Image: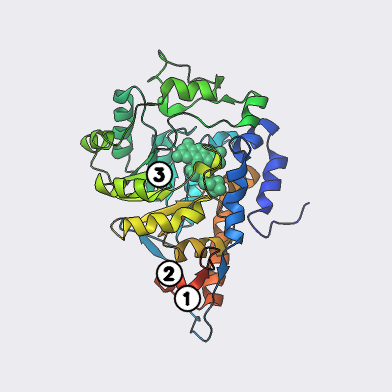
């Protein structure tokens, strides 16, 4: 038997072995030249740590609070589509792992298990990621189901009016499995049954006219806090605060949308400054190490979301694989805190890292 993985990167190879090429490519890939995909990870490597010594680190407390919900560490599960392509138990397994790790899972609108199935399978705090559809009435119905099933926030993804060009999926003729949140809702418009081409599906259902004015509409149909996912500039960060969102997720969609956007870690600080502490800023893209979590927090994020590594853990070993991935990141983060002289999350400051921009 192959040796046990010792870091989350090693789960990628296990996922490759476990999955048909088409699905592995779907989970791994980025847009076009995949420049941003590489940069999301590489930019972390250019940030160095500035540890403090002779600090009492005999007790490390990684816990933090997001929108009032206490979690065991600032590491959450990003919304990623179609978990049943990775493992038959799909999002239910991922949600159970989130519960076991005492963290928050954000369920994707494009999940293979339904909002209800995930809710009834675990008692973790769950958020729901929303794409607004051309058929607003259907989005409203989904939001209603999300509220009814105890999800605690809506994470509105705003970087996907159309689907980025993912060339591996085009080559593989990647098709969608059944997206069961839409079951019975969309059948007359677009085929959401097994076999739909991803791009055609997105073009058929996503509302490309969505704009800042529509945040008001979303607020009018729900009392849940709304976070905006996909902000990369100070201009948009200010605008988001102005329209009254409850939080911002700095994200380039794991480099699957617009290639040649900067690595998310290199724009995090710009967004944090613009927000000025008025709402929490979450972060995703390229988090593969506990040191990455630490760097994102030092640059002002309240927590990170993890995308691909979670899916790799799921593909490798279902719920247990996802748990392992989160535990590994937590263990590495705890060690990073100890070796940097931080016993609580709030001890992590800007002075604990140095970026390439600091040297200019
Ligand atoms: C995603 N992402 C995503 N985002 C979203 O808002 N809704 C979605 O349905 C999906 N689906 C999805 C599928 C797959 C296979 C991936 C890899 C990503 C983006 C996701 O939430 C997150 O922004 C990135 O995955 C973060 O980057 P890392 O951790 O994968 O590097």
Residue under label 1: 342
Whether tag 1 and tag 2 are in contact, CB under 8 A, the answer is yes
Disc 3, SS: strand
Give the residue drawn at x 39%, y 47%. Answer: 126
Q: Quadrant of residue 71?
A: bottom left
Mark 3 near ligand 1 (CB under 8 Å)? Answer: yes
Q: Look at the picture and state if 341 lies above or below 94.
A: below
Give the residue drawn at x 47%, y 76%. Answer: 342
The residues tagged by marks 1 and 3 sit, at their Cα atoms, a distance apart of: 29 Å
Could you tell me residue 120's position as x and y percent?
Answer: 40, 41
Mark 1 near ligand 1 (CB under 8 Å)? Answer: no
The residues tagged by marks 1 and 2 sit, at their Cα atoms, a distance apart of: 7 Å
Give the residue drawn at x 31%, y 46%. Answer: 240
Residue nearest the viewer, comparing 149 with 174: 174
Residue nearest the viewer, comparing 203 with 188: 203
Disc 1, SS: loop
Residue nearest the viewer, comparing 347 with 115: 347
């Amino acid at each position: 038997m192959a040796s046990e993985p010792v870091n989350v990167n090693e789960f990628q190879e296990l996922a490759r072995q476990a999955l048909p090429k088409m699905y592995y490519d779907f989970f791994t890939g980025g847009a076009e030249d995949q420049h941003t995909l590489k940069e999301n990870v590489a930019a972390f490597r250019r940030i160095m740590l500035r540890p403090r010594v002779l600090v009492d680190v005999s007790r490390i407390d990684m816990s933090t609070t997001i929108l009032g919900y206490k979690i065991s560490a600032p590491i959450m599960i990003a919304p990623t589509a179609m978990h049943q392509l990775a493992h038959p138990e799909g999002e239910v397994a991922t949600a159970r792992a989130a519960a076991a790790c005492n963290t928050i899972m954000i369920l994707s609108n494009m999940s293979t298990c339904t909002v209800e199935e995930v809710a009834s399978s675990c008692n973790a705090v769950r958020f729901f990621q929303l794409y607004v559809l051309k058929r607003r009435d259907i989005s409203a119905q989904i939001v209603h189901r999300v509220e009814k099933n105890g999800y605690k926030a809506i994470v509105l993804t705003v970087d996907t009016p159309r689907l980025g060009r993912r060339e591996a999926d085009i080559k593989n003729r990647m098709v969608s499995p059944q997206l069961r949140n839409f079951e019975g809702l969309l059948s007359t418009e677009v085929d959401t049954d097994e076999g739909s081409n991803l791009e055609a599906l997105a073009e058929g259902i996503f509302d490309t006219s969505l704009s800042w004015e529509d945040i008001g509409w979303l607020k009018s149909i729900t009392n849940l806090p709304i976070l905006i996912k996909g902000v990369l500039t100070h201009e948009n960060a200010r605008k988001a605060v102005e329209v009254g969102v409850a939080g911002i997720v700095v994200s380039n969609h794991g480099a699957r949308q617009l290639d040649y956007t900067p690595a998310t870690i290199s724009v995090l600080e710009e967004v944090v400054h613009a927000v000025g502490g008025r709402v929490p800023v979450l972060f995703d893209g390229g988090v593969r190490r506990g040191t990455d979590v630490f760097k994102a927090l030092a640059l002002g994020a309240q927590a990170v979301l993890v995308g691909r590594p979670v899916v790799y853990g799921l593909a490798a070993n279902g719920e247990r694989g996802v748990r392992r991935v989160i535990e590994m990141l937590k263990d590495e983060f705890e060690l990073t805190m100890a070796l940097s002289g931080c016993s609580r999350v709030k001890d992590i400051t800007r002075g604990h890292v140095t970026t390439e921009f600091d040297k200019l």
